[in-house]
Image (tube, rainbow, N blue to C red):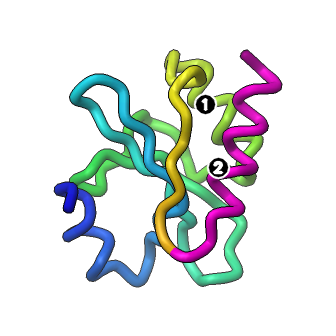
């Protein structure tokens, strides 16, 4: 269990969809808001925004943000039941590598 697991287990606002590990750093990509929301944030394990971005409107926007901060070569790992967002993000990152 990562330190982020405890944060996300009690959250009704953030639904993690992917995890990225680079050395000893971990980032989560989380859907923000209601279940049907298409907004995302990139968060640290403590739930803080990784960078001063507003919620991002798509996984494509997440991919661009990860690229801007040199995280685009890190393969996203699925989190939770739905693996599709992590697969989509991996495809988007591979296209831009």
Residue where numbered disc 2 is placed: 56
Q: Nearer the viewer, residue 83 or 5?
A: 83
Q: Residue at x 57, y 29 (%)?
A: 66
Picture residue at 38% right of the left edge, 42% below the top: 27
* Residue at 42% over, 50% down: 28
Q: Which residues are magenta?
A: 81-97
Assign the N terminus to one quadrant of the image. bottom left
* Nearest to the observer: residue 54 or residue 2: 2
Looking at the image, how many numbered discs can be counted on the residues?
Answer: 2
Badge 2 marks a residue whose secondary structure is: loop
- At a point 41% along the width and 83% down the height, the residue shown is 12
Q: Considering only vertical position in the picture, is 57 above or below 36?
A: above
Disc number placed over residue 65 in the picture, else none: 1
**Do labels 2 and 1 touch, CB within 8 Å?**
yes
Q: Is residue 89 magenta?
A: yes
Q: Earlier in the sequence, mark 2 or mark 1?
A: 2
Image disc number at residue 49 = none
Q: Is residue 88 left or right of residue 10?
A: right
In the drawing, does residue 22 fall left or right of residue 30? left
Q: Quadrant of the C terminus?
A: top right
* Category of crowding for the residue at label 2, using alpha-carbon neighbours closer than 10 angstroms: few (below 14), some (14–19), many (at least 20): some
Q: Position of residue 23 (x, y in %)?
A: 28, 23
The location of residue 52, given as percent across then percent down, is 44, 36
Residue 63, image x, y percentages? 67, 35
**Image quadrant assignment for residue 46:** bottom left
* Residue 77: x %, y % from top left: 50, 48
Asked whether, in this view, residue 65 is left or right of residue 25, the answer is right
Residue found at the very far right of the displayed protein? 95
Q: Secondary structure at mark 1?
A: helix
Q: CA distance from mark 2 to mark 1?
A: 9 Å
Majority secondary structure of the magenta segment? helix
Is residue 82 one of those drawn in magenta? Answer: yes
């Amino acid at each position: 269990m990562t330190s982020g697991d405890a944060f996300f287990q009690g959250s009704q606002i953030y639904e993690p969809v992917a995890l990225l590990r680079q050395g000893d750093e971990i980032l989560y990509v989380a859907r923000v808001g209601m279940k049907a929301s298409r907004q995302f944030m990139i968060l640290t394990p403590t739930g803080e925004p990784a960078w001063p971005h507003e919620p991002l409107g798509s996984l494509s926007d997440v991919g661009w943000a990860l690229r801007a901060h040199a995280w685009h070569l890190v393969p996203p790992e699925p989190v939770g039941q739905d693996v599709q967002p992590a697969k989509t993000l991996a495809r988007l990152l591979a296209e831009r590598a």
